Image (cartoon, grey):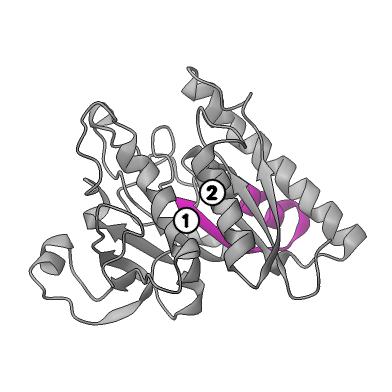
Amino acid sequence: MISNGKRLAFIIHGFGNSYTTERLVSIKDSLLSNTDDIETVIMVDWKRGAAKPNYIEASVNTQVVGRQITFMVNQMKNVLKLDPKNVYLIGFSLGAQVAGFAGKYSQTEYGWKYGRISGLDAAAPLFEKYPGSYLTKDDAIFVDAIHTSAGHNLIHGEIGFIEPYAHVDFYPNGGHNQPMCHNLLKISCNHYASVLFFDASVSAHNVCHFMAFGHCPNWSAFTEHKCTKSDGQMGYLADHFHMNGVQYLSTTNSYPFCNI
């Protein structure tokens, strides 16, 4: 059951994952143990539709899964009087695109918006060149994004979006080359860093603050200490601040990853 004022969260896995993927289960556990406003977490399992090696098929299936999630939430709205503003979608990789389609369908088919969507290094291949097919700030009341493998070189593990697409877009360590990812054989390390950072923003929120800096033209300006005004925090608490646009920050190479 979901109490009045409490939020329902959906965690949506990506390509080749399932609802039992350890790093995503950790986010679920962190949300239930370390937040006051999230009472229920649903782990979406579309592992058959996201199975390797067929990325093209999995990409197409994001639309189907997004529609199914929204159908379910609309039923909960009608039967249980669930307020969609209290529904929070957290999607990793292709799961972020699932969340985007869920947000689009909620508006075109039912006339309501989700409260929040967090895109954790949203998958770019087969999406970024096709406007209307990927997660954007129009898909929920508040959309935030964490970019950790931004680029076009798949051989080097550059899987995520380069361009901003949310109300607020965080580029930790410039959006690629994460400090814990030195093993070139683990090409997905940068991609999964988004999950690790988000999880830490929940589980260690009392001691770890991912302070981000806007009003900053680029990553080089940030590294040269030309950006001095922090707008707020990356991760779970992003919606507690009045932030928008591109935000930069640096992290450490081990848990809880924050510098502040």
At 59% across and 60% down in the image, what residue appears? 31
Give the amino acid at mark 1.
Answer: Asp
Q: Where residue 260 sits in the image (x, y, percent)?
A: 29, 73
State the image coordinates of residue 46 (x, y, percent, origin top left). 65, 32
Residues under labels 2 and 1: Cα distance? 7 Å
Residue 199 disc label: 1
Residue 105 lies in the magenta-colored region: yes
Marks 2/1 in contact by CB < 8 Å: the verdict is yes
Residue 198: x %, y % from top left: 44, 57
Residue 207, image quadrant: bottom left
- Vertical order, 196 against 168 (above or below): above
Residue occupying the point 51% across, 57% down: 118
Q: What's drawn in magenta, residue-wise?
A: 102-120
Q: Nearer the viewer, residue 176 or 253?
A: 253
Position of 47 compared to 96: left or right?
right
Is residue 229 positioned above or below 233 on the image? below
32 with respect to 197 (left or right): right
Q: Which residue is mark 2?
A: 26
Q: Is residue 96 visible?
A: no
